[in-house]
Amino acid sequence: MTVYLDHNATTPVRPEVVDAMLPWLRDGYGNPNSVYSLGQRARAAVERAREQVAALLGASDAAEIVFTSGGSESDVFAIAGGAWQSHDETKGKRRKVVTSKIEHDAIRLLAGQLRRRGLDVLEAGCGAGGVVDVAAMTAMIDDATAVFSLMHANNETGVLQPVAELASAARAAGALVHTDAVQSLGKVKLDAKALGVDLLAVSGHKVNAPKGVGALFVRRGVRLIPLVTGHQEKNRRGGTENTASIVGFGVACELAGRELSAAHQHALALRRRIEAGVLLIAGSRLNGHPDLRLPNTAHFSFDGVDGHHLVVALDLEGICVSSGPACSSGASTPSHVLTAMGVPPELATGSIRVSVGWGSTDADADRLLAVLPKAVEKLRAVGAAA
């Protein structure tokens, strides 16, 4: 039986979500933009899902939710769309994007594109605990800043970032404020208004909905240049809406909101159980702030062990963990997040991420703790012999 402990990579789709989607895959095939009843039933389902997502994000109005294909599109739409809109509106005065060195690859790779197109992109570092340098990041913000972007929780270490504190400084300078909250959705309370952000990105497959659907919270009054042109989503994102997946995403958000407190406590208890056992292994360390973290995420390094080899060794025992973000699995270089934290390369390449979620049990944690020490010992022995 598979022990799945990689919920930060993706999550299993809940049965309630599948059940909600099936009618829209079978008989509810109408285009939600059609005026006849088959289409209007689909439109009503999409709008209901918009309300469910808005409720989980603390949006004032469901119309502030724009459906997308996922977190990466939402991030790029927010930053690129916001930067070009602001650049055009100010006739080039606002030409700067301020972000951090620990962002998701969707944002890191976008930064290179924006630089090649003439914008200035500044990236703040972080401390050893994985929290961004607030003073350094604040100093980067000025009246030339078009967009300020800081992730809510890091996808590798789970470390929570001071979004609200920095959002205040960015908005005072007149910049748009974006946060990538993909990993936080359904794990901790999200309130776009309390965070003070203009733009907030989330993804369905991180919260037990299907892959290929996500959303961007766009505060009322904020304008973005669309990435996908068309009249759908109030002219903000073209393309016929994926009704079934949007419905599933909405149901998943409603379930996550209803169960948030209990899920948080369950995940935290499992995480602490796993950490206590793993840190008994000689030459192990926990990466990231010990407290300012998502309740479900633990990131470990082991002396003398290659993280990819360890992932394979655990997989042979039916246990799924990762050696970094799923989008860069197989990479031979140390994680950019661990590098920014100052973790030595030999330790950074000997790391794994364990993330629990819906369906994770004490038995899963115990299985990992029974297998992991032996796997580490065996890989160290092989390395020493080589």
Image (cartoon, grey):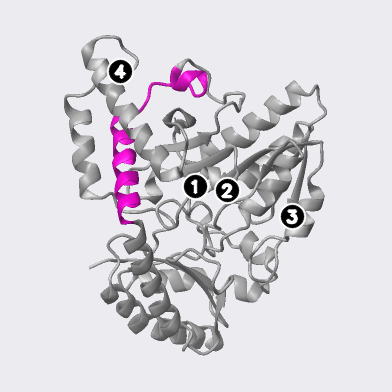
Q: CA distance from mark 1 to mark 3?
A: 24 Å
Q: CA distance from mark 4 to mark 2?
A: 35 Å
Q: Quadrant of residue 270?
A: bottom left
Q: Secondary structure at mark 1?
A: loop
Q: CA distance from mark 2 to mark 3?
A: 20 Å
Q: Residue at x 80, y 48 (%)?
A: 140
Q: Which residue is mark 2?
A: 195
Q: Which residues are magenta?
A: 232-259
- Disc 2 and disc 1 in contact, CB within 8 angstroms: yes
Q: Which residue is mark 1?
A: 191
Front position among marks 1 and 3: 1
Q: Secondary structure at mark 2?
A: helix
User: In the picture shown, does residue 232 fall above or below 176?
Assistant: above
Dominant secondary structure of the residues highlighted in magenta in the image = helix
Instruction: Point out the image quarter for the N terminus.
Output: bottom left
Front position among marks 2 and 3: 2
Give residue 124's mark: 3
Q: Amino acid at mark 3?
A: Ala
Front position among marks 1 and 4: 1
Q: Position of residue 136 (x, y in %)?
A: 79, 57
